[in-house]
Every structure is written in C-alpha cells, then in structure tokens.
Amino acid sequence: MPGRTDEETNADVRMEEDGAPTSHQPDNEEEFEDAQQFPEEEDEEDDSEQRVRILPGSTDSAASFEFRNENHTLGNALRYIIMKNPDVEFCAYSIPHPSEPLMNLRIQTYDGTAVAALSKGLKDLQDMCDHMFEEFSRTRDAFLNEMRD
Amino acid sequence: MAPFVKPSEAELERRRTIQINDETVTNISSTDFPGHYPGEDNSWSFETFKNTFRVEHHYLTPAESSFSLIGADAAIANALRRILISEIPTLAIETVYVYNNTSVIQDEVLCHRLGLIPFTGSKKGIREFLRWRRKAEDGTPGPVYDYNTVQLRLQVECTRNPSAAPDEREPTKLYHHAHVYARDIEFVPAGRQADLFQAPEDIIRPVNPDILVAKLRPGQVIDLQMHMHKGVGADHAKFSPVATASYRLLPTITITRPILGRDADKFARCFPRGVIALERVSAAEANTPGSGYEGHEGEKKAVVADPMKDTVSRECLRHPEFEGKVKLGRRRDHFIFSIESTGQWDSDELLLEAIKTMKKKCERLEKQVINMVR
C-alpha cells in the first residue's frame, strides 16, 4: 500500500524534526486544555454520511436496500427478525461482492411498506438486545453470588 | 381469522432438534417463521422472547467464561459472536518508531510482534477517556493527543555479566538483558494520562509480562518508541478483545431402546467420560411389560448423564449393536458460548458489550432509515 508507506515516512520525518512524537509535546499547553471539550462521543462514527439507500426498481411493498459498511453480522440478524414479521412475504440479504463493504437487503410485504418492515425489524432487534442484556447481567450476578457462597 | 393453533410438545421438540445421522445432518434450518406452518403464529413477540430466552452460566473467570444462550436464533448468536471478535474496540500498539535495532530480529518482524502483545490498564481510562484517533481531512491519520494515543518505550541493551561463573553456558546468566520480555516495555504518560493510568493497578501494562519479544547478545540494542491507538478486530486481529469466541449447539442423545449389560459398557466407551452413566435395571422397570427391561432386573443399563460433555463424534452410530437404539442430535436454540479474553476486557463484560454494540448499530441504522425516507 503506497499510501500507507507515505504516511509512515511523513510521521518519521516529523518525529525527527520535533525530537519527540507529536503526542509528547507539552509545549502546546492549549492542546490539552482544548481537549477538555471532547468531540461528542456518539458522533465518533460519522452519522452525517448516509449509509442506507433504496435501490432502483423498488416499489413501496417490494424494495431492496443497500447498506454501506454492514456485513453478515447485521444482515443475517436483520433478515431473521424481519422474517418474523407476519406482514412480510419475503426477506433475504446478500453480500454482492466480498471486496465491497456493501450488504443488500430485499423485503417484500403483504401489508404495509418495506421501509416500515425494516424500521420495525430494527426496533425489535433493539428490544431483543435490551432483554438479553438484562437477562445476562441478572444471571451473571446470581452465578457470581452462588460461586462466592 | 381462525384462532392460532399450537403445535404439540413432541412436534416442538422435533423442530428444535437437528438430527445427526451416521452420514447426514437433517432438519437444519429454523422454521419458526410466520407462514411456514399453516394456522400457527410464529411472529415476533417480545413477550414470548422474554418468557423463553434464558442464560445459564457454566464457568466464569475474568480470563475465560462459558455460558449458554437458550431460546435465541442462530442469526442472533452468530451476530454476537462476530461482534465479539471484530467490533469491540481495544487499545493496541499501532505505530512503532524504531530508533535503533541491532538485534537479529528484523525491524518489521519486531514491530509486528510488538503489535500483537495484549495490553491492559485502567478500564475507565481506556474506555471512557481514550478515543479513536480520527483521520484528517485528506484521509491521513489525524493528530495525536493524550486522549487518543498512548506512548510506550522500549530501551534495552544487552551487556556481559561480569559476575557470571567462568564455565556458565546459560545466556540469561551470562548476559544482562539476553531476553527482552513484554515487561521491559515502559508506559510514558502524556497530559492527563498520568492521573488516569497510575501504577500499579491502572498503569498501561502488558497482560502477561513474560511474553518473549526478542533475544539479544552483548552489544545489541533495541531502542524504540510506540504509539497505541484504539481499533477494532475488523481492522487487525491485534485489536480483537478475544483470543477465541465460539459457540456450539447442545448435543442431544436419545436412547430409544434399552442398551443393557456388556453393550452398555461399550456404549459408554463410545462417548467422552461422563456423558453416559451406567445404572442397574430396577425391579419396577423389569416388571413393566413393554419397557424392554423384562427379565433384566439388576443388569447394567446405559443412561444419558451429561450430554453437554459430548463431542458428537458419532462413534456409537458405527456399531451394529446400537442400530435403532440411539438418536443423536443438537438443540437448535441452545448455544454454548465459550469466550476467552485477551485481558483488556473481563470475559463476562464482553458479551454485554457485544449486545450493547449490536443495539447501537440498530439505533444508528434506524436514524439512517428515517433519513433515507425523508
């Protein structure tokens, strides 16, 4: 990767000029002062960029969605939960090509829109996560108590 | 609409068992979807999930844990496993500035070895204080601050040990610093890190101080500085918080017809120790017509003691004397997880973090979907 080599060289050069890596510069007190106001933690991943789009040819009740930077992790979980929706006739996902960071999801509905089914799926998954979290914490604490006794 | 029909317990049992036959595996896919079985309601219900989902813990230490998730689908269990491996952030050495390296191990190999050493330190500091190192506008790595970079230093020189015995052959006694270990890596605090990562509990340190990094001979020097950043396993395995995170399905063994006497001994030997127990046929059983035990009172019989220990080797299916007497399978919705942490996270925190990560993903996407429609 030429890009990577370049940046490494630059870093090296800068280091030699400064005599210390950039993070080691206490001369710039403001840097650390400023850092008190962190950028918002939640915005770590850029939310401004639109990562979901509807593919051409979609209708209200039968649509394909393209997710950027998603993979089997969410693809299959989402497929499962959307298939659990009785209004959904068909749901499947695919990774069109392994070297593109894209995941496609197809939803066809009997009733309601495909977008609504997708939103419901995402909501149901969150409910599920909440319960799994609580249940796991509860049983873990009980197990630890039991072990202590 | 007609009321929903409820499948019988036997039918449910059949549906949640994956059959393991001598040459094939059958009944593989989940079928609990609406529309699959006419007249049944298989739609998602939070209430049903609440009632059926269970967690059982088997083993729990900070380094290693094992537990069962019961009542979840493979899609969910697999999502959690994948998140454990590749999406939970940890701190690892990302950049190494080699000032001097005259050891026999090449710079790039040494740097790679350093990158793979797992480190730990104040949980609060690593999780709350430390941030991602952002990219600059042009895509190059952004500036480093005390809140996104941890500095380390490794400076060792091998020298002769003048007080070694004249006939000494052991390099570690003959020389000082013949071996460079992970414990020789020093944390160099910057800014607020000095308060957050205080020795001995919270200092940034290798999880295992005894990891051998390099070997030196007199006159050889390693002098380098390292920058650690936060990253995820998807980018590089060194950022993965787990050594292994895997699951298997609970094996099931059903003895359909009695296995008695010497066959029972042989049957027990087809499985790992503890899976099959041997009991005596009781008088009551021997007196029950049609039980298959008639006239065998006091003989040994094979019973299933602990299927969780089974490795599903299918050895018992190779012997003609057990044909038609045993069925092997796996429980579709019983996932026995095993998580081994590399040390930056405790093993029980990891699954909780994975669940949190999955929820966060969904929340983000929900916003994205709303945006998309707008």
Image: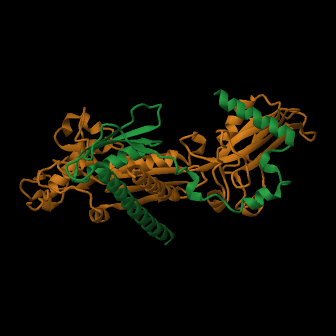
Percent across and percent down for residue B86 are 51, 44
Compared across the picture, whether B160 is left or right of B103 comes to right
Q: Quadrant of residue B26?
A: top left
Q: Pick out the residue farthest to the bottom.
A: A149
Q: Residue at x 65, y 57 (%)?
A: B126
Percent across and percent down for residue B22 are 24, 34
In this view of the protein, which residue sits in the foreground, A141 or A98?
Answer: A98
Using the rendered image of the protein, determine whether residue B95 is visible from the camera's viewpoint: yes
Image quarter in which the N terminus of chain B is found? bottom left
Location of residue B361 with respect to A149 vertically, above or below: above
Q: Color used for chain B?
A: orange
Number of numbered labels in the structure image: 0
Location of residue B175 with respect to A45 vertically, above or below: above
Percent across and percent down for residue B330 are 29, 46
Chain the render paints green: A
Using the rendered image of the protein, determine whether residue B249 is visible from the camera's viewpoint: no
Compared across the picture, whether A44 is left or right of B166 comes to left
Report the coloring of the rendering.
Answer: by chain
Q: Residue at x 60, y 52 (%)?
A: B343
In this view of the protein, which residue sits in the foreground, A14 or A57?
Answer: A57
Q: Residue at x 53, y 58 (%)?
A: B61
Q: Pick out the residue farthest to the front.
A: B374
In this view of the protein, which residue sits in the foreground, B194 or A78?
Answer: A78
Location of residue B170 with respect to B52 vertically, above or below: above
In this view of the protein, which residue sits in the foreground, B344 or B188?
Answer: B188
Compared across the picture, whether B316 is left or right of B125 comes to left
Percent across and percent down for residue B273 are 37, 47
Q: Quadrant of residue A59?
A: top left
Q: Pick out the residue farthest to the left.
A: B289
